[in-house]
Amino acid sequence: MWSSLKREIRIGVRQSSDLVNSLFFFLMVLSLFPLGVGPGADTLRLIAPGVIWVAALLSTLVAMESLFRNDFDNGAIEQMAMSERPLALVVLGKILGQWCLSGFMLVLLSPVVGVTYSLNGAEILATAVALALGTPTLALVGAIAAALTVGSRGAGVVLAILALPLYIPVLIIGTSMIAAAEAGLPVTGYALWLAALLMLALAFAPIATAAALRVSLSH
Amino acid sequence: MWRWFHKLGSPRSFYLISNRLLPWLGAAAGLLLVVGAVWGLLFAPPDYQQGNSVRIMYIHVPASILAQSGYLLMATAGAIYLIWRIKLADIAMQCVAPLGASLTFLALVTGSIWGKPTWGTWWQWDARLTSTLVLLFLYLGVVALRSALEYRESAGRATAILALVGVVNLPIIKYSVDWWNTLHQPSSFSLTEKPAMPAEMWLPLLVMVIGFYCFFFTVWILRIRSEIIQRESGTEWVRGVAGS
């Protein structure tokens, strides 16, 4: 698992265009909303939780689309499936490795985003924690959909159709957490909910992803 | 018992058994739907608050119940296919998805029509409406995945995995949406408690629900049969059936 995590990070750093694109995508979506609804600080604060999370959802999808594609095309996935290490753990390493370069970057970007949406320090902290706990769940669940669609035609759109409904719980709790911070309410409850969902996804998503990859390999 | 079960699992004997079952099921569906609809729409008392608009309940509630059972049936068929690789389960799963999606759509549309006179709005971002909408999306995901994959065998397994992931997620989605926003009344029906509405209202509703179930199974079996014929075309027994 750790070796596949390191491998994923190394490949990601060397071929950074896909992941950099997903970050740019995140920032672009976020900068479109002030242009669309107007730059008033009150409006921006009102829409910030939802907009940040929807942008995070979409950019996770963009990153997920390339998670298995290269390895699938050049046969590396097949080797992983045949090796004696459990495929679920190898896949888990891959997903976490990719999250370090995509979801975690969103966490690091959250102060910038928070300032442009005129959030204050505590609210930015809540945003960062929410993203840190929520985006790994998005990556894990998205990986199932990515594994199901890899190697099929029109994979990108189908991936979005499969994954987005499953993202709703994280979206709801994540936005509630930021909104609660804006209202000055305690946020630990929301953080624990996000953490619980993350634990659930950590336990089950790699197994489902591995099963889905084996199905995709049998095409 | 087990032999009978195995026999039912083969497409050929399913086709032959369903041949005998289908007229009865179809007749029951027709009868129950006509009786329930006439009873509910003409003879059941109007609601003391909602007046006659409550009558759309006789369509809306069965459709919503079926929409949810349909997903459960699809996931069960998917699990059976993943574990035992019974071909019939794959066919059943493939055939139930569009059916469930259309019933979910029907539930949403009738709910919307009912919502206009009672809540004063066509659509409200309420918890149960939203989770039904999500259910529709999950159905559409299964249909979309099936049509995106070219090879039948692996497409069946892939959609089965997706249906199972969806079933694990459904309660989570349901509770998170509930927590988010609620306007819809809680369900007035359950298996264990006495219904909270008078008998002259819940009896026709019950007839409609059973009628919808019969209708659902009739259409499902019809779809399965046509899929079986399509897949097995070229085999000896299909030629025999077509010839007779």
Image (spheres, coloured by chain):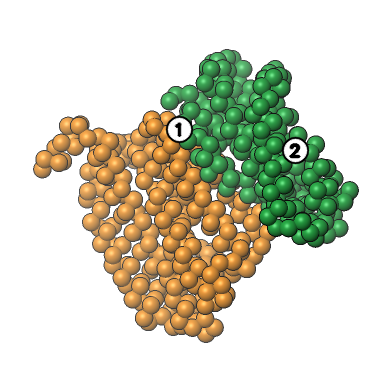
Chain colours: A green, B orange
Give the number of the disc on residue A106. 2
Nearer to me, B190 or B232: B232
Residue in the foreground of this view, choosing between B33 and B60: B60
Residue at the (72%, 47%) spot, across then down: A31
| Vertical arrangement, residue A54 with respect to residue A211, above or below | below
Element type at marker 1?
loop
Q: Amino acid at mark 2?
A: Leu
The Cα atoms of the two marked residues, 1 and 2, are separated by 29 Å
- The image shows residue B234, relative to residue B180, as above or below, that is above
Circle 2 — which element? Answer: helix
Q: Amino acid at mark 1?
A: Arg
**Identity of the residue furthest to the left in this view:** B244
Q: Quadrant of the N terminus of chain B?
A: top left
Report the chain holding disc 1.
A
Q: Which residue is mark 1?
A: A153
The vertical placement of B234 against A15, above or below, is below
**Relative to B36, B82 lies left or right:** right
State which quadrant residue A13 falls in. Answer: top right
Q: Position of residue B173 (x, y in %)?
A: 61, 51
Q: Residue at coordinates 48% horizontally, 23% vertically from top-left?
A: A217
Residue B230 position, x and y percent, is 26, 39
